[in-house]
């Protein structure tokens, strides 16, 4: 079948003589329009090759889409709210702010949380980490409320809860009676009465609703998602690749800032400038 296509195209070339490229393209297109079955048969005979070409095209399109999104976000980064009364890890003045939208019962969130927590603990002068919630179902939301409730009276214990909850994620998912949750709270030394009093605070619901609303405004619909100085990194990445992403974002941000047109001095009252 491919031979038939080649012969048909060769015939067009021979009868057309010396023509420019646009005329040749038009003539080839005319042959295909008049003989569409040639193309259909060729596609059937080479279906796997055609599928590979289509997949390659889709991958390339998605890559270009991601690159365009990255450039757009670096030019106009998201501005997440940083709550003074909520827990944060690292140096408040660190050059890199990571805002983490996560779900305590999401397996990839567990991996992602370990990556960013380790980066902040190892390089507190470079990173600060803000933890936000995007719970996908009821049990996740309850764990998010417990984290925020503990943080109201002890931010250090809140992050201990954070670590243990992710470590025992599968047990918590199957914890119908709250036994595993109770053991975690006992292990980190949380007073049940103090926790219950904190859980009754309407501000906790405000925190979660604000996180979910903010995520929606930023078109974040999956966990984990991280904002690195306002630029989104979607999904779990190993530590080395995550750091590469951070460095690339910082580098591109610096280049764009230096490429901006400087604002020159103007004389608004020239006589008083003499």
Image: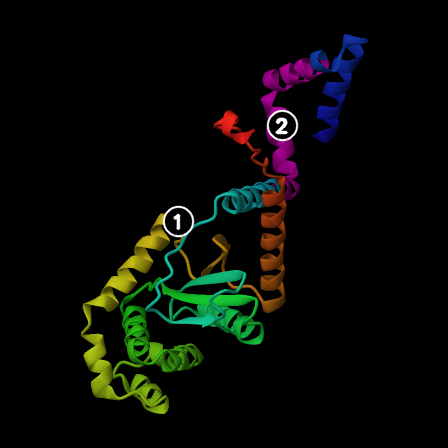
Q: Residue at x 28, y 64 (%)?
A: 207
Q: Is residue 5 above or below residue 188?
A: above
Magenta span main SS: helix
- Element marked by disc 1: loop
Percent position of residue 103, x then y: 38, 67
Residue named by callout 1: 219
As rendered, which of 51 and 113 lies closer to the eye?
113
Nearest to N terminus: mark 2 or mark 1: 2
Q: Are marks 2 and 1 in contact (CB under 8 Å)?
A: no
Q: Which mark is residue 248?
A: none
Task: Confirm whether residue 255 shows in the render.
Answer: yes
Q: Residue at x 56, y 70 (%)?
A: 125
Foreground disc of the pair 2, 1: 1
Percent position of residue 168, x then y: 41, 81
First to last magenta residue range = 24-53
- Element marked by disc 2: helix
Percent position of residue 15, x then y: 77, 9
Residue named by callout 2: 39
């Amino acid at each position: 079948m491919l031979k038939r296509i080649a012969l048909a195209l060769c015939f067009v070339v021979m009868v057309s003589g010396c023509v420019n490229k646009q005329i040749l393209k038009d003539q080839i297109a005319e042959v295909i329009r008049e003989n569409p079955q040639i193309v259909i048969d060729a596609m059937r005979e080479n279906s796997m090759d055609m599928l590979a070409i289509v997949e390659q095209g889709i991958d390339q399109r998605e890559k270009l889409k991601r690159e365009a999104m990255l450039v757009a976000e670096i030019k106009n980064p998201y501005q997440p709210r940083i709550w003074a009364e909520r827990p944060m890890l690292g140096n408040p003045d660190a050059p890199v702010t990571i805002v983490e939208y996560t779900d305590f019962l999401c397996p990839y969130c567990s991996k992602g949380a370990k990556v960013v927590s380790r980066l902040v603990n190892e390089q507190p002068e470079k990173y600060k980490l803000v933890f936000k919630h995007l719970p996908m179902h009821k049990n996740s939301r309850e764990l998010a409320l417990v984290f925020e409730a503990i943080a109201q009276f002890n931010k250090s214990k809140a992050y201990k809860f954070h670590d243990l909850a992710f470590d025992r994620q599968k047990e918590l998912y199957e914890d119908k009676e709250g036994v595993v949750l109770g053991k975690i709270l006992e292990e980190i030394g949380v007073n049940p009465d103090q926790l219950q009093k904190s859980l009754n605070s309407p501000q906790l619901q405000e925190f979660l609703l604000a996180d979910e609303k903010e995520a929606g405004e930023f078109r974040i619909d999956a966990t984990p998602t991280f904002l690195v100085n306002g630029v989104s990194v979607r999904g779990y990445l190993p530590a080395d690749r995550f750091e590469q992403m951070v460095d690339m974002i910082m580098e591109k941000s610096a280049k764009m800032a230096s490429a901006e047109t400087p604002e020159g001095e103007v004389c608004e009252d020239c006589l008083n400038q003499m």
